[in-house]
Image (cartoon, grey):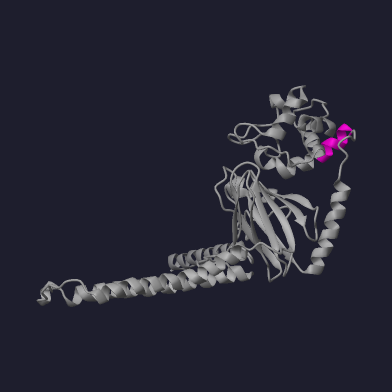
């Protein structure tokens, strides 16, 4: 009797433990991300532009046509095989070509192709019509982030970099990231646009081929070094929408997300006003002479936003990524060597160029690396030094 009671108690404890585990797993389960990927997604993203809606309709339309053709062709084939099999005494007929049949199987496929081509051509032509845009933004692909420059329309003159959020990179580096709805899709500076506005996106790249893709908009456009391509969208809903670089662009390809925040026109105007004030406050005179402490403080922020993902916060690097803590180039008294690395990159792009950063940001991050961790050089790099190296 005691044995039975003990067994029941053990089973009860196991049941409670199993239930708690399942409850915990359920609580930690990843949810569908509005504007991004859904759990167990089979269909296309819910469209928020007319182009994306047309693409989804075409998808269903082509699927129906292909399904009907598949069922018709294989139905006739299997019926013929079953009905006229030898075991039932069927004998092969001896006949020559039929002009009527040949005309039918030429005209019918032609009509099907035309029926498929006409709506597809209409959508493709609409996708390429970037004229009369209300807002023009240049998206530049870098290894591995996006640069956005507002060229025309409300917000003209605004420019910034959009980089994977550092916490998400750390989750990836851990090898055991916790369930996160927007895993590897969170950025520090999303692209912001107004709703019901035709936005033209001009794409190019600084190094290798990238691709700017947001499925909910029905947009995918390659960004090619030395070339300018363009696409457009008109978001009909406000919210957050996500995409990724869709061309294999190197080892950090998975860490190049796209986040577009669509605001009401009133909220967008407020964002533009605030962003311009922020840029004006952050504008630096390259001829200003900085104190060591101020540069180190500024450089720490630049390093955290752009360098820590690869070189780590402790400067030790990881795998093929060289450390900056104790690096001969960093410790070298000739500061032009490290400036050249940041401006031009090295190791065939393994260390990308950072020309897109301002002279002050480059000077600050170099000064920070020269005076952090075990690198106590006391050396200062001024923005004027970087400006001179650009020439």
Q: Position of residue 40 (x, y in %)?
A: 52, 65
Q: Which quadrant would the N terminus be assigned to in this image?
A: bottom left
Q: Is residue 32 at all visible to an observer of this figure?
A: no
The residue sitting at 57% across, 43% down in the picture is 250
Name the side, left or right, on which 379 lies relative to 209.
Answer: right
Query: Along the line of sight, which residue is nearer the eye, 113 or 20?
Result: 113
Residue 249 occupies quadrant = top right
Name the side, left or right, on which 180 lies relative to 390.
Answer: left
Q: Position of residue 82 (x, y in %)?
A: 20, 75
The residue sitting at 87% across, 54% down in the picture is 277
User: Which stretch did the figure color magenta?
Assistant: 290-298
Question: Could you tell me what secondary structure mostly forms the magenta stretch?
Answer: helix
Q: Which quadrant would the C terminus be assigned to in this image?
A: top right
The residue sitting at 79% across, 64% down in the picture is 268
Residue 78 occupies quadrant = bottom left
Task: Confirm whether the magenta stretch covers residue 313.
Answer: no
Q: Position of residue 38 (x, y in %)?
A: 57, 65
Query: Along the line of sight, which residue is nearer the eye, 330 or 23?
Result: 330
Query: Along the line of sight, which residue is nearer the eye, 354 or 140?
Result: 140
Count of number-bearing discs: 0
Query: Along the line of sight, which residue is nearer the eye, 157 or 20?
Result: 157
Q: Is residue 76 at all visible to an observer of this figure?
A: yes
Q: Position of residue 67 (x, y in %)?
A: 39, 72
Give the answer, above or below, for where 383 lies relative to 111. Answer: above
Name the side, left or right, on which 272 lies relative to 180.
Answer: right
């Amino acid at each position: 009797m005691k044995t039975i009671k003990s067994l029941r108690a053990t089973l009860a404890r196991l049941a409670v433990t199993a239930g708690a585990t399942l409850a915990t797993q359920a609580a930690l389960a990843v949810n569908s991300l509005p504007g991004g990927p859904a759990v167990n997604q089979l269909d296309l993203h819910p469209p928020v532009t007319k182009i994306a809606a047309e693409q989804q309709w075409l998808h269903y339309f082509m699927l129906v046509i292909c399904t009907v053709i598949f069922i018709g062709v294989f139905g006739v084939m299997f019926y013929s095989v079953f009905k006229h099999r030898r075991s039932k005494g069927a004998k092969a007929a001896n006949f020559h070509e039929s002009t009527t049949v040949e005309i039918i199987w030429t005209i019918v496929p032609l009509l099907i192709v035309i029926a498929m081509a006409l709506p597809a051509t209409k959508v493709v032509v609409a996708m390429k019509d970037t004229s009369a845009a209300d807002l023009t933004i240049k998206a530049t692909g870098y290894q591995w982030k996006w640069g956005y420059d507002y060229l025309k329309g409300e917000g003209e003159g605004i420019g910034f970099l959009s980089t994977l959020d550092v916490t998400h990179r750390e989750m990836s580096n851990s090898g055991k990231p916790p369930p996160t709805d927007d895993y590897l899709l969170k950025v520090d500076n999303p692209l912001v646009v107004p709703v019901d506005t035709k936005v033209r996106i001009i794409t190019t790249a600084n190094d290798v081929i990238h691709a700017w893709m947001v499925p909910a908009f029905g947009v995918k456009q390659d960004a090619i070094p030395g070339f300018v391509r363009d696409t457009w969208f008109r978001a009909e809903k406000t919210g957050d929408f996500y995409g990724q670089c869709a061309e294999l662009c190197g080892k950090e390809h998975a860490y190049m997300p796209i986040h577009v925040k669509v605001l009401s026109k009133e909220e967008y105007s407020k964002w533009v006003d605030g962003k311009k004030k922020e840029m004006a406050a952050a504008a630096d005179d390259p001829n200003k002479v900085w104190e060591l402490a101020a540069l180190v403080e500024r450089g720490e922020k630049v390093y955290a936003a752009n360098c820590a993902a690869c070189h780590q916060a402790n400067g030790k690097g990881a795998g093929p990524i060289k450390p900056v803590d104790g690096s001969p180039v960093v410790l070298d008294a000739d500061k032009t060597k490290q400036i050249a690395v940041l401006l031009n990159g090295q190791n065939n792009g393994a260390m990308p160029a950072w020309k897109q950063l301002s002279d002050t940001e480059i000077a600050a991050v170099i000064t920070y690396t020269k005076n952090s961790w075990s690198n106590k050089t006391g050396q200062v790099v001024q923005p004027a030094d970087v400006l001179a190296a650009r020439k």
